[in-house]
Image (cartoon, helix red, strand yellow):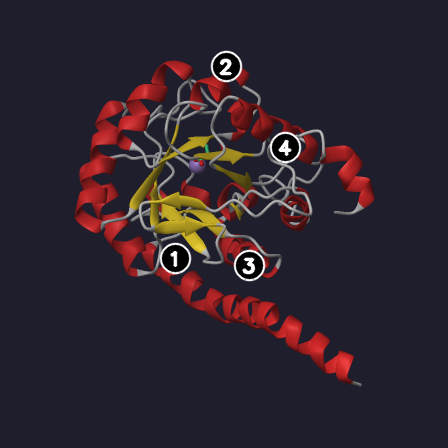
Amino acid sequence: MDPKWNGQFSCFDRVARTDVCSRTVVRVRDIEIGGGDFVVMAGPCAVESEAQILQTAEAVAGSGARILRGGAYKPRSSPYAFQGLGVEGLKLLRKAREETGLAIVTEVMSEEDVEVIAEYADIMQVGTRSMENFSLLEELGECGRPVLLKRGMTATIEELMRSAQVLADAGNADIILCERGIRTFETATRNTLDIAAVPVLKTVSHLPVIVDPSHAAGVRSLVPALARAATVVGSDGLLVEVHPCPEQALSDGNQSLSFREFRRMMLDLQPYLDLQQRTRNARPQLLATRGAD
Ligand code: PEP
Ligand code: MN
């Protein structure tokens, strides 16, 4: 590790990368996150109805997603906005898993909900507003499910690493880090995607890192470009919002892709993923050629 970063992050000894430790691969059913596959998690911001979640699950699975996202407990900026279906939403997610085989990632906001959500979810999502909710992180330590830890919208990389350390200290080392954009002075996008955070995190931590281009962009037309950027900088996957009819979504419709747009995005990503793969495979060969000169 670069000596600058070593000094800054080595104190987070459970999640910091060292010369000797191997990378963490988070296993969810038959899916490996951080093991070389590019894993796409997709679905609506919030579970709204049976038809909505089942149709979305079918569509995203058909386009190559491996994990279905969907909030049943929603942290909303306004108290008047849709707050989610709660346990009813969890049951619909389970039904979608039974019908499509997709694993489920869904958000947990409060330590009181950990037990019930862990019954239904394959991955527990900690949202940007909860990254420093240490009592929630401690409760997740023993939940028996991997945690998708989103970066706080005003958190530094160091603070994200600190929260990961708290989770690992509490007994849960199955952590996936997620860059979802941070607050800056820029207002043209909802957040600013800190794309450099991906290679920094991959350098200073052994944990898998994914990117959420939807909450970073806030507008659907930017999502495919940010997703491509994520592949190029070495992200282990994506978390993307998709809705059968984004204009009618109860939350985050502006940044949600339609089924067709999601399919197109996935097709367009392929050459970038192939390039990443070739770059990885080519590296030893290039060195060997140089060595022979
Ligand atoms: C979400 O994934 O729908 C969400 C609320 O994300 P964030 O916590 O990043 O805002
Ligand atoms: Mn959302």
| Three-letter amino acid code at the position of disc 4 | Met
Identify residue for label 3.
231
Q: Splitting the image into 4 quarters, where does residue 113 fall?
A: top left
Q: What is the distance, in whole Å, between disc 1 and disc 2 at their CAs?
A: 36 Å
Indicate the position of residue 102 as horizontal and vertical percent values.
28, 48
| Three-letter amino acid code at the position of disc 3 | Thr
| Three-letter amino acid code at the position of disc 1 | Phe
| Above or below 286: residue 65 | above
Identify residue for label 2.
135
| Above or below 231: residue 77 | above
Q: Secondary structure at mark 2?
A: helix
Q: What is the distance, in whole Å, between disc 3 and disc 1 at their CAs?
A: 16 Å
| Three-letter amino acid code at the position of disc 2 | Ser
Indicate the position of residue 258 as horizontal and vertical percent values.
35, 53
| Above or below 56: residue 273 | below
Q: Residue 262, labelled with which disc? A: 1
Q: Residue 161, labelled with which disc? A: 4
**Number of numbered discs present?**
4
Question: Can you tell which of label 4 and label 1 is closer to the viewer?
Answer: 4
Which comes sooner in the sequence, label 4 or label 1? 4
> What residue is rendered at 61% in x and 70% in y?
279
Q: What is the distance, in whole Å, between disc 3 and disc 2 at their CAs?
A: 33 Å
Question: Can you tell which of label 3 and label 1 is closer to the viewer?
Answer: 3
Disc 3 + disc 2, Cβ < 8 Å: no
Horizontally, residue 87 falls left or right of residue 161, namely left
* Quadrant showing the C terminus: bottom right
Which comes sooner in the sequence, label 1 or label 2? 2
Report crowding for label 1: few under 14, some 14 to 19, many 20 or more residues within 10 A (C-alpha). Answer: many
Which comes sooner in the sequence, label 4 or label 3? 4
> Looking at the image, which is closer to me, 31 or 195?
31
